[in-house]
């Protein structure tokens, strides 16, 4: 697999056919529209288009999205994790008449919801007023009563904790020229009306305030409390009737939620089209289009450009344009899922290497090595397979599921080598049912307790040294693979000296040192071969530094290269011990849960083992993914990867609610 070769397109056409051309290119989905730069001075008459249409379509998309959110609780549309997106023809998606009808329905729903919200505010206000009137319902006087020519009318509230007699006593002490009428009570206060002669009004009010009474201002009311209460109740009834009509409007549109979703997808296509249009340059009658497309699409692109009568120039990107060239990776079923991983890190540069074919086997292998359980692998593989078959996800979601499916298969493979099925689930289960059933299971090749139905090659808990050596061996293989890719790329670019004095030299040094140390244990000549390789590599490293530095400064560079190389390679290879750590951690946690459950009997064992292994699976999924990703991005990519590319993002149909069947548009 490789990075797709791109062509640079620059085309000039008449504005009257611009929108139709963009729609055709959107249907093709193979042209990324870029912003032109470094144009000749004679092209200064071109300028970016206005953004009025973009704002218009964004507004319509917001209306549709809001209506869908409102209708979510009303519709009976079939949905679920395993429900695939419904399929619609491309012409159905872009049906303007259906779109306008859906937009009108969305506006109805939004207006009804806004009216309901306003009514709710009114209702809350009316209910508050009703609550305030309740204590005065039995008072047969107008609430706006102010008194007579010689008397003042005052409305008061007082805490329930203060006895009525205390109020009367304080009034008697202040004056005899008053008349007190008690009204109702609520949870905290009791209320009363006081008629007092104007000559004593100030003294009475001061005395009551000192007692803790509060004078109430009931201005704004007209008539008795009972009359106002009845009027408010009638208004609440009217609001309820209006709300029923508004609610029915929303419910009647609930069956159209799918139409609204199709319309929202269509609106988003128009938003994307307008954003692409904003990257064009316009004059009064013409427009300039600048962009990129894959080489294999050249004939199709030319046919469309010719059909619309555009003048165009198509060229291979110059080397100085490489940073601007969008990146599309040519993938197959094995490598395509790992495009997600690459994109999370950074897309490769246009003149770099597609890492997916090299990374995919290591990612699958390492993930399975750390997960290392037949049961967990089966759950991953079956779960993702069912999801892929039923939901038919596309894009990054589908890639992630495919990647985890392959990692699940890898986990089954490694689990079959270690005899792990939800840890030691079967040995613990057989002990509880009938210990004689343990005779069915076989111990690992190196000895130990029986764990599986055939002899496992090793047990990660009991064979720590072997697992550690295996982890570091896998690390050496990946590091050496990264060095090999870097070496090949340097030779392609004509950087033979750099390749010889780096990758080739370190191959010799590392392999030679390993043979010199361990070779004599196998055969004496291997030690000699190792020394020859070791000193040969050191010589290559020294000569390379001397040539690059053109003087004795190369000796300093040689010393630094030895130090940095030894410490760098050693630390990188040690990083792969995380493979061992996660393999052992997952196995031990599973055994702990199984052992804990087995203490209490068969039924508790099954419950505890089930819950514990589900938790362990979730933790392992996260841990294995993160650490596998780290090994690829740091230890592996650091050897050869040239990043900095931007993903190819052509003008195309991208939907959220429907799966579009390609057709004419």
Image: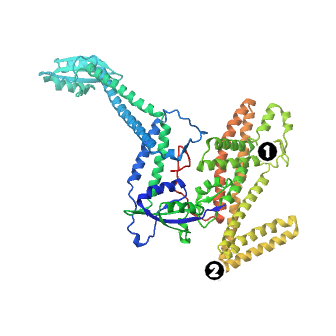
Residue 263 can be seen in this image: yes
Q: In the image, 228: left or right of 518?
A: left
Residue 457, given in percent of the width and then of the height, sits at 82, 49
Q: Mark 1 = which residue?
A: 419
- Name the mark on residue 90: none
Residue 470, given in percent of the width and then of the height, sits at 77, 56
SS at mark 1? loop
Q: Residues within 10 Å of mark 2 (few under 14, many from 20)?
A: some
Indicate whether 575 appears above or below 191.
below
Residue 190 can be seen in this image: no
Of all residues, the one furthest to the bottom in this rendering is 551
Which residue: 32% across, 27% down? 126
Which residue: 57% across, 42% down? 85
Q: In the image, 64: left or right of 397?
A: left
Q: Mark 2 = which residue?
A: 549
Q: Write down the quadrant of residue 335 in the picture.
A: bottom right
Indicate whether 552 appears above or below 205.
below
């Amino acid at each position: 697999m490789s990075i797709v070769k791109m062509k640079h397109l620059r085309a000039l056409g008449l504005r009257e056919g611009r929108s139709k051309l963009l729609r055709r290119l959107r249907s093709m989905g193979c042209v990324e529209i870029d912003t032109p730069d470094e144009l000749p001075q004679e092209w200064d008459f071109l300028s970016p288009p206005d953004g009025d249409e973009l704002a218009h379509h964004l507004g319509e998309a917001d209306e549709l999205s809001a209506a869908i959110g409102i209708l979510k609780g009303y519709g009976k549309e079939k949905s679920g994790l395993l429900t695939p997106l419904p399929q619609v023809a491309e012409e159905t998606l872009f049906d303007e008449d259906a779109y306008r009808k859906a937009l009108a329905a969305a506006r109805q729903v939004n207006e009804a919801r806004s009216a309901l919200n306003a009514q709710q505010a009114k209702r809350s206000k009316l209910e508050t007023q009703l609550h305030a009137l309740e204590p005065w319902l039995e008072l047969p006087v107008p609430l706006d009563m102010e008194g007579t020519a010689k008397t003042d009318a005052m409305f008061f509230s007082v805490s329930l904790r203060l006895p009525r007699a205390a109020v009367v006593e304080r009034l008697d002490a202040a004056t005899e020229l008053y008349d007190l009428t008690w009204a109702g009570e609520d949870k905290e206060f009791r209320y009363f009306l006081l008629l007092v002669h104007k000559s004593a009004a100030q003294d009475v009010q001061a005395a009551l305030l000192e007692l803790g009474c509060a004078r109430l201002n009931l201005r704004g009311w007209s008539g008795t409390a009972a009359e106002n209460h009845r009027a408010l109740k009638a208004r609440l009834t009217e609001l309820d009737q209006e709300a029923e009509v508004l609610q029915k409007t929303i419910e009647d549109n609930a069956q159209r939620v799918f139409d609204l979703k199709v319309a929202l997808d269509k609106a988003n296509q128009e938003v994307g089209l307008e954003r692409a249009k904003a990257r064009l340059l316009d004059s009064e009658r013409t427009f300039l289009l600048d962009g990129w497309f894959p080489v294999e699409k050249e004939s199709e692109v030319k046919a469309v450009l010719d059909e619309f009568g555009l003048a165009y120039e198509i060229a291979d990107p110059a080397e100085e344009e490489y940073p601007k060239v969008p990146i599309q990776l040519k993938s197959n079923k094995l490598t395509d899922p790992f495009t997600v991983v690459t994109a999370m890190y950074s897309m490769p540069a246009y003149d770099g290497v597609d890492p997916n074919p090299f990374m995919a086997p290591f990612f699958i292998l390492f993930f399975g090595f750390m997960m290392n359980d037949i049961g967990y692998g089966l759950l991953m593989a079956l779960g993702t397979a069912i999801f892929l078959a039923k939901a038919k996800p596309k894009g990054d979601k589908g890639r992630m599921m495919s990647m985890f499916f392959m990692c699940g298969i890898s986990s089954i493979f490694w689990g079959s080598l270690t005899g792990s099925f939800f840890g030691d689930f079967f040995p613990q289960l057989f002990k509880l049912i009938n210990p004689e059933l343990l005779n069915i299971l076989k111990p690992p090749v190196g000895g130990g307790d029986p764990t599986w139905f055939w002899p496992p090659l090793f047990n990660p808990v009991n064979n720590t040294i072997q697992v550690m050596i295996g982890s570091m061996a896998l690390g050496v293989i990946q590091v050496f693979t990264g060095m090999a890719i870097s070496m090949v790329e340097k030779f392609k670019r004509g950087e033979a000296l750099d390749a010889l004095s780096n990758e080739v030299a370190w191959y010799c040094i590392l392999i030679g040192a390993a043979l010199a140390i361990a070779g004599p244990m196998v055969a004496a000549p291997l030690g000699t071969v190792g020394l020859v390789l070791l000193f040969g590599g050191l010589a290559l490293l020294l000569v390379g530094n001397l040539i690059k530095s053109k003087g004795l400064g190369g000796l300093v560079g040689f010393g630094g290269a030895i130090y940095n190389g030894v410490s760098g390679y050693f630390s990188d290879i040690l990083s792969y011990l995380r493979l061992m750590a996660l393999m052992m951690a997952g196995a031990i946690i599973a055994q702990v849960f199984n052992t804990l459950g087995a203490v209490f009997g068969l039924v508790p064992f099954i419950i505890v083992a089930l819950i514990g292994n589900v938790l362990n699976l979730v933790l392992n999924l996260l841990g294995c993914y993160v650490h596998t990703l780290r090994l690829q991005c740091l230890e592996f990519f650091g050897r050869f990867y040239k990043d900095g590319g931007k993903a190819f993002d052509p003008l195309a149909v991208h939907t959220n609610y429907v799966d579009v069947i390609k057709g004419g548009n």
